[in-house]
Image (cartoon, grey):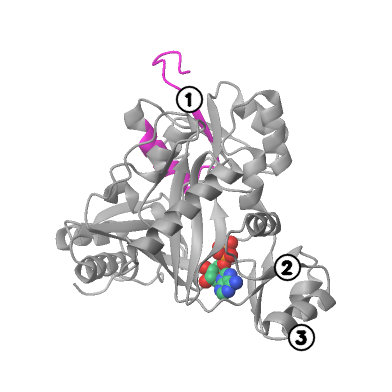
Amino acid sequence: MDGRTGLPVVGMVGAGQLARMTHQAAIPLGQSLRLLAEHADDGAALVAPDVVVGDYRSLADLRAFAVGCDAVTFDHEHVPNEHIAALEADGVNVHPSAAAAIHAQDKSVMRRRLTESGVPCPRWTTVGDAADLDTFAAEVGWPVVLKAARGGYDGKGVWVVGSAAEAAPVLASGTPLIVEEKVAIRRELAAVVARSAFGQGAAWPVVETVQRDGICVEVLAPAPALDPETAEQAQALALRVAADLGVTGVLAVELFETDAGLVVNELAMRPHNSAHWTIEGARTSQFEQHLRAVLDYPLGSTAPTAPVTVMVNLLGGPDDVEPKSIDERVHHCFAHWPDVKLHLYGKQFRPGRKVGHVTALGDDLETVRARARAAADYLMNGGAL
Ligand code: ADP
């Protein structure tokens, strides 16, 4: 507890944009997030006063950080699982637990567990050598999708390979791999839920996540033209996975919509890009909900605040944009699209880097989407208005 306010202290390992937005959500709850940052200029470390700079790979640093925290949680999945377990053994209140978190850290553990519990997944197997891959590909057909079991993000660690020859360099890298059939994806969806330590669950509307080059560029909430029965199934599936795995906090279940129904792509156990829209688009944002869940507070309403919400990620554009000053572009953006809400993460702009997002709300998908896209495009790429 904070001795001055009597309110709990949540420690978040990692100080990127997810921590930055969680800190924003902590403030009205009377709290201030404590951060274990890699660098003093990480996005969240710039705006929260209680920052420890340290190494999330060091158990000593994690232990020192946890002292005085009522709950410890994460803004990424890279903390070694054995360190999470060690903190738990020390008596630290860690969310998600090591036993749950492993399913967001290791794709082979995740696939095995989900397959065992009857959750629909792409056909998959672990890959030891080229012979394993050939056997699998003979069964499902080339191309197949190789994935690093650990450490991938934004499509890094995912290789679509059309032949044994194409797979050879990936296999030779020595990275532990799984292989999946290449699913004929109609579109990608996400079912984001939260589960508290007590076991209360809450689901936001299922969204469509629009991807380009393995990166989510846009989120449409709710997923357009998704039939209510499938949407409900997806929410129920995500809540069941959260309960089965004992997840506490936010769980994002990334899904592929296929002709044969929904299959699970992967799990994230932290606030997730597919639910940034909830800051304005739902009564309770995923960031507030994550805090409620890890503190075992009752969860908040997930009801949408508008019929349609669209979030567009801001991916750094070229260096030679006009007008050159981002401040000037913000100025014009606000003048042109007063309804569009801006979130910048305090990061240096680099081409392709996720530096923020914008959100627009309204009644009509095409109108809302066009406004959000145009504002995002102008902010990153400038041009005439
Ligand atoms: P990351 O952990 O890097 O986010 P994902 O497992 O989410 O990697 O894969 C990134 C993207 O690759 C997905 O969003 C999807 O577009 C594509 N992809 C992943 N797995 C498959 C698959 N089995 N079949 C077809 N496309 C896939």
**Residue 354 falls in image quadrant:** bottom left
Where residue 312 appears, as percent x and y from the top left, is: 34, 63
Q: Which residue is mark 1?
A: 9
Real-space CA distance between mark 3 and mark 1, rounded to the nearest whole angstrom:
53 Å
SS type, badge 2: strand
SS type, badge 1: loop
- Check disc 2 and give the amino acid type: Thr
Where residue 112 appears, as percent x and y from the top left, is: 69, 58
- Check disc 1 and give the amino acid type: Val
Residue 100 can be seen in this image: yes
* Closer to the camera in the image, 59 or 384: 59
141 drawn magenta: no
Where residue 304 appears, as percent x and y from the top left, is: 27, 50
Where residue 262 appears, as percent x and y from the top left, is: 49, 67
In the rendering, which numbered label is found on residue 314? none
Mark closer to the observer (2, 3): 2
Q: Which residue is mark 2?
A: 125
In this rendering, the answer to whether 173 lies above or below 222 is: below
Instruction: Report the span colored magenta.
Output: 1-26
Ligand 1 falls in quadrant: bottom right
Real-space CA distance between mark 2 and mark 3, rounded to the nearest whole angstrom:
19 Å
In the rendering, which numbered label is found on residue 165? 3
**Residue 300 falls in image quadrant:** top left
- Check disc 3 and give the amino acid type: Ala
Q: Are marks 2 and 1 in contact (CB under 8 Å)?
A: no
Residue 349 can be seen in this image: no
